[in-house]
Image (tube, rainbow, N blue to C red):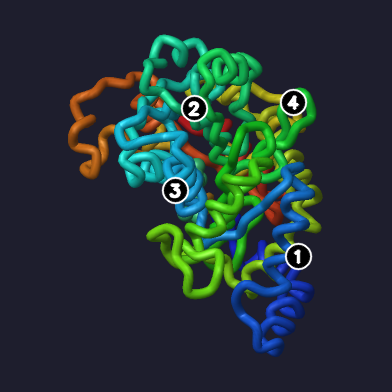
C-alpha cells in the first residue's frame, strides 16, 4: 500500500530547500527583519509577475482583502452598509473581509460545472448600494468572465479579486489573475501555490491612491514615522517570508506545470459513475491549487481512500451561510453551494506528488464501490 498525504509541506519546501535555507540564513544574519530590501525585492518581483503596478506585502491573505475594502472606505468609494457581490461558495475569509468593514456581502450561487460564481445571477442582485463585485479564483480556476467585466463597467463597480488560490492563473486574454480587477488580495499561506513558511499576503493594484492607502493602513495607519493618518494595524510581511517567497516565485511556473500534469492525469483517467469533475479548462486558466471532485457517496469515498493510504480534504464542509458566525444567514437556502459542501472532495495535488502516486489514487478511485 502506498502512503500519499494530501500535501506534504516538508517535501514542498525541500524541493527548493537549499535556496530557501540560504535565503533565510541571509536575513537572519543581516540584522534587518522588517520593511527592508527583501520586501522591496519581493514586492517588485511579484508585481512584475502579476502584471500590476504595485504589490504591497502584508501579514496574510485575509488582511490583504480587509485592507482593500478598508482603503476604499477611507477613500470615500464605499461606506458602511454598502453591498459587495461575492460567491457563496468560497473560503470564508473572502466574506470576513467584507463584514469586517461593515459592508454587506451579497451571496451569489456558483455554477455546478465550474464551481465559480454564476455570472448569470449577478445582475439581478445589483442595487443602488452595490459598490463592488468580489470574485474568487477558487481551487486555482480563473473565475473572471468578460461578462463580469462588462457588469462592473455598466454599473460603475469596483472589481476585487481574491487570488489566494490562483497565483499564476490566466484569463483567456492572457492577463494574469490579480491584474484583471481594480485590486486583488493574495495569500501566501504555506499550502497555497506560492506559500511562505508561515503567514503572508499581498495586495496588487494599478491604483496609486489605493496602493498608498493599503500600505499606510497595514503599517499602523502611518506613512511617516510617528504620524498617524488612519487607525490602522500592524499587518506587515516580514523579511524572512519575503526572502523565501522571492525564491519560490522563481519556480512558481514550473511548480504549477507539475500540478497541471497531475490534473491532466486525473482528468484523463478518472472514470466512475458516481463521480463528476468540474469542466476542464485550458491549461493556462487553471493552476490547480486544489483538484476538486464531486461524489454522490463522498464521505464513504473519503474514508475508503484514507483506509488505503490516500489523504483527501473537503473544501469546504460547511458553507459560509451555514456557519455560526453568520447566524442571520443560517435560514437561507443556496442549493448549489450546499450541494458542493456535501459532495466535494479534493484529491492530492501539488508540486511534489509523483505520477506513480497519482496513478495509484486513480486506480483506487476507479475501483471504488
Ligand atoms: C487562504 C485563503 C484566504 C485567506 O488567506 P490567509 O493567508 O490564510 O489569511 C482568502 N481567500 C481564499 C479563497 C483562501 O483560500
Q: CA distance from mark 2 to mark 4?
A: 24 Å
Residue 37 placement, left or right of 325: right
Q: Residues within 10 Å of mark 4 (few under 14, many from 20)?
A: few
Q: Secondary structure at mark 2?
A: strand
* Residue bearing mark 4: 282
Residue 176 position within the rendered picture, expressed as x and y whole percent measured from the top left:
73, 36
**Which is more N-terminal, label 1 or label 2?**
1
Q: CA distance from mark 3 to mark 1?
A: 24 Å
Disc 3: CA contacts within 10 A as few (<14), some (14-19) or many (>=20): many
Q: Earlier in the sequence, mark 2 or mark 4?
A: 2
Image spot of residue 226 (x, y percent):
48, 74
What is the distance, in whole Å, between disc 2 and disc 1 at their CAs?
31 Å
**Quadrant of residue 292 within the rendered picture:** top right
Q: Nearer the viewer, residue 13 or 38?
A: 38
Q: In screen coordinates, is 8 left or right of 37?
A: left
On the image, the x and y values in percent for residue 263 come to: 68, 37
Disc 3 + disc 1, Cβ < 8 Å: no
Q: Which residue is mark 1?
A: 41
Amino acid at each position: 500500500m502506498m502512503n500519499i498525504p494530501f500535501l506534504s509541506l516538508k517535501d514542498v519546501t525541500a524541493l527548493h530547500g537549499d535556496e530557501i535555507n540560504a535565503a533565510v540564513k541571509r536575513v537572519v544574519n543581516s540584522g534587518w527583519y522588517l520593511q527592508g530590501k527583501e520586501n522591496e525585492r519581493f514586492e517588485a518581483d511579484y508585481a512584475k509577475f502579476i502584471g500590476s503596478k504595485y504589490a504591497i506585502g502584508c501579514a496574510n491573505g485575509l488582511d490583504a482583502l480587509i485592507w482593500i475594502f478598508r482603503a476604499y472606505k477611507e477613500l470615500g468609494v464605499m461606506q458602511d452598509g454598502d453591498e459587495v457581490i461575492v460567491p457563496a461558495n468560497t473560503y470564508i475569509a473572502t466574506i470576513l473581509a467584507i463584514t469586517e468593514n461593515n459592508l454587506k456581502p451579497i451571496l451569489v450561487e456558483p455554477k455546478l460545472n465550474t464551481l465559480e460564481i454564476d455570472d448569470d445571477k449577478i445582475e439581478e442582485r445589483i442595487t443602488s448600494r452595490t459598490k463592488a463585485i468580489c470574485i474568487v479564483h477558487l481551487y486555482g480556476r480563473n473565475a473572471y468572465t468578460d461578462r463580469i467585466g462588462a457588469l462592473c463597467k455598466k454599473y460603475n463597480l469596483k472589481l476585487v479579486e481574491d487570488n489566494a488560490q490562483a497565483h499564476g492563473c490566466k484569463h483567456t486574454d492572457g492577463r494574469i489573475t490579480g491584474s484583471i480587477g481594480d485590486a486583488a488580495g493574495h495569500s501566501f499561506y504555506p499550502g497555497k501555490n506560492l506559500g511562505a513558511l508561515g503567514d503572508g499576503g499581498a495586495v496588487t493594484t494599478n491604483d496609486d491612491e489605493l496602493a498608498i492607502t493599503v500600505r499606510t493602513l497595514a503599517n499602523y495607519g502611518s506613512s511617516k514615522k510617528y504620524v498617524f493618518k488612519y487607525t490602522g494595524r500592524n499587518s506587515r510581511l516580514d523579511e524572512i517570508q519575503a526572502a523565501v517567497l522571492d525564491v519560490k516565485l522563481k519556480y512558481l511556473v514550473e511548480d504549477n506545470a507539475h500540478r497541471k500534469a497531475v490534473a491532466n492525469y486525473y482528468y484523463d483517467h478518472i472514470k466512475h459513475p458516481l463521480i463528476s469533475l468540474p469542466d476542464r479548462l485550458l491549461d493556462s486558466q487553471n493552476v490547480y491549487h486544489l483538484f476538486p471532485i464531486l461524489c454522490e457517496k463522498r464521505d464513504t469515498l473519503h474514508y475508503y481512500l484514507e483506509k488505503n493510504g490516500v489523504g483527501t480534504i473537503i473544501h469546504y464542509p460547511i458553507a459560509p451561510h451555514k456557519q455560526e458566525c453568520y447566524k442571520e444567514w443560517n435560514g437561507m437556502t443556496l442549493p448549489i453551494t450546499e450541494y458542493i459542501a456535501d459532495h466535494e472532495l479534493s484529491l492530492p495535488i501539488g508540486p511534489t506528488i509523483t505520477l506513480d502516486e497519482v496513478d495509484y489514487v486513480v486506480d483506487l478511485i476507479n475501483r471504488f464501490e
